[in-house]
Image (cartoon, helix red, strand yellow):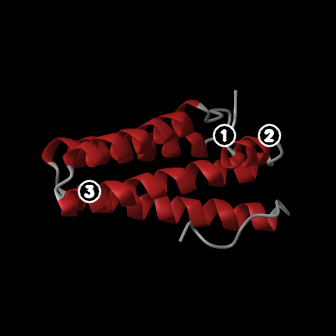
Amino acid sequence: MITSPYDKYRQSSVQTSTPSQLLLMLYDGAIRFVRGGIEGIKEGDYDKVNTLLNKAQSIVTELTVTLDYSYEVSKGLASLYEYINHLLIDANIKKTAPPAEEALGYLLDLRDTWAQAAKLAGGGVPESSNG
């Protein structure tokens, strides 16, 4: 049972969002978790690194399994998502920031691209990429 007001709000926003808004929420979550993982690496907090980078990997995996392969672009996205996951695993194992920073760059670019596409399609999408 959901008890906190924040959890109720979050559940409501997921249930009432358009597909493009849901996609951007996934990107925002992955971006937030990768940034937190990078922060954890810099702080030497390896439990935080492991937890947050694993959460980011889960989101990237979700993005991968929900691709519609009837579109040619999905094959390229699948390869890119696989590479992003590889970078996140590398960063987590070695506890070094550069692979996570590279993954973050791809996620930010993809998020911005999808936001522009949704805007052009009239999807009512937030402007910024998760400050």
Q: Amino acid at mark 1?
A: Tyr
Residue 46, given in percent of the width and then of the height, sits at 20, 47
Image quadrant where one finds the N terminus: top right
Question: In the rendered image, is residue 107 in sight?
Answer: yes
Describe residue 85's horizontal placement relative to residue 19 as left or right.
Answer: left
The picture quadrant where one finds residue 102 is bottom left
Name the residue beneath numbered marker 3: 40
Nearer the observer: mark 3 or 1; the answer is 3
Q: Give the answer, above or below, for where 7 lies relative to 35.
A: above
Where does residue 85 sit, x and y in percent of width and height?
36, 42
Residue 32 appears left or right of 97: right
x then y, percent, for residue 116: 69, 68
Q: Secondary structure at mark 2?
A: helix
Circle count: 3
Q: Residue furthest top?
A: 1
The mark nearer the N terminus, 2 or 3, is: 2
- Looking at the image, which residue is at 67% across and 43% down? 4
Q: Which mark is residue 15?
A: 2
Label located before the other in sequence (1 or 2)? 2
Would you say residue 83 is visible in this rendering?
Answer: no
Q: Quadrant of residue 24?
A: bottom right
